[in-house]
């Protein structure tokens, strides 16, 4: 239903005139928004659903929001704004908000503090399992602003804004964020940081007075990206506490923040927000021009981080373009051969891979002209005939004859200065004219926002895919953007580069339906829901060290479900850390993800190949569960252990991986609870040994371990727990539960 009116329909306490109060709800969560005639919509409640009541006289009763508006009106504190203030979806100082503004900019230096007036309201019910949307358009001070709010059936809230300049003078955007309220119970904040090969390391702090801001100026999401900035009740965990999380679905510069001020936040206590972080002058709008923010996603849960993750995961899986199951077993050639491309060697590698059940064979870096190391060739996306005199056809034909798909590595957004492209078009670099940006990885960014550069790269990729018909591209992006300047105008270029990269991916996918693409960015440097709108998985990290991977895959799962995270079995000695790990741990670490191998398996022993063969068969058996079920993670009281699992949506089946990360002060682990099981069900628990048995240090193991399993109720396993064997450090075991 659409309203185009400036008149109120009823009054709330304090004489605030409003159009309506809109309640969007789904999956146990609610977003209640008040839409006034003057000012932007303001959120009265975001969190647990507000159940309605039946009318005592047989009427419809209440929708659950009765009295909410009055209960939300704040007092006016002494020595503050003289009248009570409520903040909107896009708060500014005009509302008495002293924190970071939801919108800021200027008309050629003329300050802009809009006092909005609503022009149009469009409300749509979600139908089916719930949800719905609200779109509000308002105008003020030479600007028009449209706010879109969507409640997804999973309970996930998505928000984006569009601002249009209606003034003759150009308008320069400084910031435009999506902002939702936090209650005073949100006393702690969690986000992630990291570096190359150590992505997504958690860090916590008190959410006191002031701002907890995470801003990225890397030109890509970043290895240190917060992923999901989460505020919650103090001590919240994976299975406990109430949490409110925000993620900005954008692959360029971005900002997330949680902010609490002594004066509060109007009807709320604090705020949580996200959005793009444009460079100064990067977004300038002529009259009639518009800017739309990325989608910003908000997830609330009263069941800890796992409940928050479930909303993200269910929404992703409900998308019509979500990658189809089953996700194929991958072999990537990088750590097997690096730049040493020899056809006979690669054929033997493919033969061995097919023999153990690999389904997709990916040729990594080193196949194109001049690429014998990482100092040359980027940008020259034609096959090096000195290495491949017949092109890639002999290898790809061989791979397909073995029943596998063929895949290929590319890095279209970068060039090496030592490349034909860079020599022919030095003006195509994303840098100040005549002055390269600081070098990184022997690369410079290629300015894809230049139409001629975009057309050149698309033409090469289109021809490459058309000729060799790869089913999969590993799409890399190996450096931060430093001093990103669009040389023709001298303006900052991160926003335009990000949009152009999206457009390149979209156009290539339209030209080649069915082509799958992985987002790799020197490992996990571009993991976000903006890139995942146009790719089919992310590469979690360049490290295949299983101990590093156990942690980073667990935290990547805050946002991304297992089937979208590439996870490979590497060699015994990890080339990024130099640490040795047994094959069972490497296999079980890679299992809960989109599994693959990155290892010269032609050098494996028969025993190792037998383990890999059994592990691949296990993955194929379990992937229908692993890639559709609910991710669960244990809150272990012992930091030396980690429990992760997947439980079927209907509770009929589950898989748990229990890992011993290091030695412990405990002589024995004790009872470990298996979360997420249906407590009214009975399960048969089996220890799956296909990947090999872990080493232990004990006189006598628990009886179930010797027997290989047991039968127990979900209540016993979830509430009382299961005695675990005393695993040695860097060991793991896999438990498979099926309903009896």
Image (cartoon, rainbow, N blue to C red):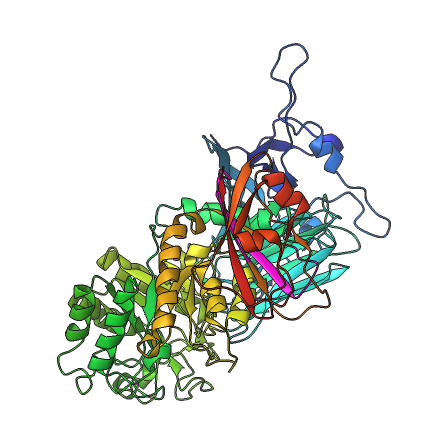
- Which of the two residues, 366 or 568, is positioned nearer the viewer here? 568
Q: Is residue 277 visible?
A: no
Estimate the x, y position of residue 646 in percent, counting from the top left. Answer: 50, 50
Task: Specify whether 389 is left or right of 703.
Answer: left
* Front residue (pair 465, 639): 639
Q: Which residue appears at 35% of the width and 76% of the height?
A: 604
Number of numbered callouts drawn: 0
Rendered residue at 66%/32% (across/down): 17
- Residue 670 locus on image (x, y percent): 69, 56
Frontmost residue, 385 versus 608: 608
Question: Which quarter of the picture shows residue 73?
Answer: top right
Magenta extent:
635-657
At a point 54% along the width and 52% down the height, the residue shown is 707
Q: Farthest front residue?
A: 699
Q: Is residue 54 above or below residue 484?
A: above
Left/right placement of residue 101 relative to residue 339 reads right
Q: Residue furthest top?
A: 57
The extreme left residue here reads: 390
Q: Nearer the viewer, residue 415 or 15?
A: 415
Q: Is 641 contained in the magenta span?
A: yes
Residue 294 place in picture, x, y as percent: 48, 56
Q: Which image quadrant for residue 571?
A: bottom left
Establish if 251 lies above or below 314: below
As drawn, 665 above or below 437? above
Q: Is residue 333 visible?
A: yes
The verdict on residue 399 being magenta is: no
What percent of the width, then of the height, locates residue 506? 31, 59
Q: Quadrant of residue 337?
A: bottom left
Is residue 358 depicted above or below 138 in this figure? below
């Amino acid at each position: 239903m659409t309203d185009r009116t400036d008149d109120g329909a009823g009054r709330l306490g304090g004489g605030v005139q409003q159009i309506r109060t809109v309640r969007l709800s789904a999956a146990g969560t609610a977003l209640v928004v008040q839409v006034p005639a003057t000012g932007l919509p303001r959120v009265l409640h975001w969190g647990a659903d507000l159940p309605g009541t039946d009318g005592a006289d047989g009427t419809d009763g209440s929708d659950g929001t009765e009295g909410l508006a009055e209960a939300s009106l704040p007092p006016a504190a002494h020595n503050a704004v003289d009248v009570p203030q409520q903040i909107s979806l896009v708060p500014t100082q005009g509302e008495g908000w002293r924190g970071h503004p939801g919108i800021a900019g200027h008309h050629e230096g003329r300050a802009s503090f809009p006092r909005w007036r609503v022009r149009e309201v469009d409300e749509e019910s979600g139908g089916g399992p719930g949800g719905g949307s609200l779109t509000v358009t308002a105008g003020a001070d030479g600007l028009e602003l449209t706010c879109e709010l969507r409640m997804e059936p999973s309970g996930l809230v998505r928000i984006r804004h569009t601002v249009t300049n209606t003034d003759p003078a150009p308008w320069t955007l400084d910031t435009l964020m999506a902002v939702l309220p936090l209650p005073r119970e949100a006393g702690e904040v969690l986000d992630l940081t990291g570096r190359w090969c150590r992505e997504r390391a958690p860090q916590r702090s008190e959410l006191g007075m002031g701002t907890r801001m995470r801003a990225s100026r890397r030109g890509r999401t970043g290895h240190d990206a917060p992923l999901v900035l989460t505020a919650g009740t103090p001590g919240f965990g994976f299975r406990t506490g109430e949490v409110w999380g925000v993620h900005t679905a954008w692959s360029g510069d971005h900002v997330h923040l949680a902010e609490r001020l002594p004066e509060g936040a109007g009807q709320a206590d604090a705020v949580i927000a996200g959005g793009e972080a444009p460079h100064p002058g990067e977004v300038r709008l002529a009259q009639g021009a518009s800017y739309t923010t990325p989608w910003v996603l908000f997830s609330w849960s009263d069941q800890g981080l796992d409940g928050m993750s479930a909303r993200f995961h269910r929404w992703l899986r409900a998308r019509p373009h979500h990658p189809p199951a089953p996700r194929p077993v991958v072999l990537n050639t990088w750590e097997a051969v690096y730049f040493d491309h020899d056809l006979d060697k690669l054929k033997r590698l493919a033969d061995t891979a097919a023999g153990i059940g690999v389904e997709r064979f990916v040729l990594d870096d080193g196949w194109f002209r001049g690429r014998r190391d990482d100092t040359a060739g980027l940008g020259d996306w034609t096959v090096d005939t000195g290495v491949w005199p017949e092109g890639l056809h002999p290898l790809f034909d061989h791979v397909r004859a073995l029943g596998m798909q063929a895949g290929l590595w590319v890095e279209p957004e970068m060039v090496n200065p030592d490349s034909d492209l860079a020599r022919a078009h030095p003006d195509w670099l994303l840098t100040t004219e005549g002055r390269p940006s600081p070098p990184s990885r022997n690369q410079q960014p290629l300015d894809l926002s230049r139409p001629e550069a975009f057309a050149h790269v698309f033409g090469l990729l289109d021809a490459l895919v058309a000729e060799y018909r790869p089913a999969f591209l590993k799409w890399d992006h190996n450096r931060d953007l430093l001093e990103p300047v669009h040389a023709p105008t001298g303006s900052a270029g991160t926003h335009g580069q990000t949009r152009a990269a999206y457009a390149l991916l979209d156009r290539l996918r339209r030209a080649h339906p069915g082509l799958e693409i992985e987002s790799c960015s020197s490992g996990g440097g571009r993991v976000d829901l903006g890139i995942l709108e146009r790719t089919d998985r992310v590469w979690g990290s360049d490290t295949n060290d299983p101990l590093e991977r156990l942690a980073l895959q667990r935290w990547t799962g805050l946002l991304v479900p297992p089937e979208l995270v590439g996870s490979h079995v590497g060699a015994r000695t990890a080339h990024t850390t130099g640490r040795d790990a047994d094959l069972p741990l490497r296999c079980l670490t890679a299992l809960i993800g989109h599994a693959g191998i990155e290892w010269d398996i032609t050098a494996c022993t028969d025993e190792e190949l037998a383990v890999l063969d059994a592990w691949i068969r296990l993955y194929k058996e379990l992937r229908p569960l692993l890639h559709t079920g609910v991710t669960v993670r244990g809150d272990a009281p012992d930091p030396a252990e980690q429990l992760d699992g997947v439980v079927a949506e209907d509770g009929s089946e589950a898989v748990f991986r229990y890992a011993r990360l290091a030695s412990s002060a405990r002589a024995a682990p004790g009872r470990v609870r298996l979360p997420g099981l249906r407590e009214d069900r009975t399960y048969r628990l089996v220890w799956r040994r296909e990947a090999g048995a872990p080493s232990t240090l004990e006189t006598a193991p628990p009886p179930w371990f010797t027997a290989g399993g047991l039968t127990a109720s979900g209540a016993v396993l979830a509430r009382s727990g299961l005695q675990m064997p005393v695993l040695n450090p860097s060991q793991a075991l896999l438990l498979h539960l099926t309903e009896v």
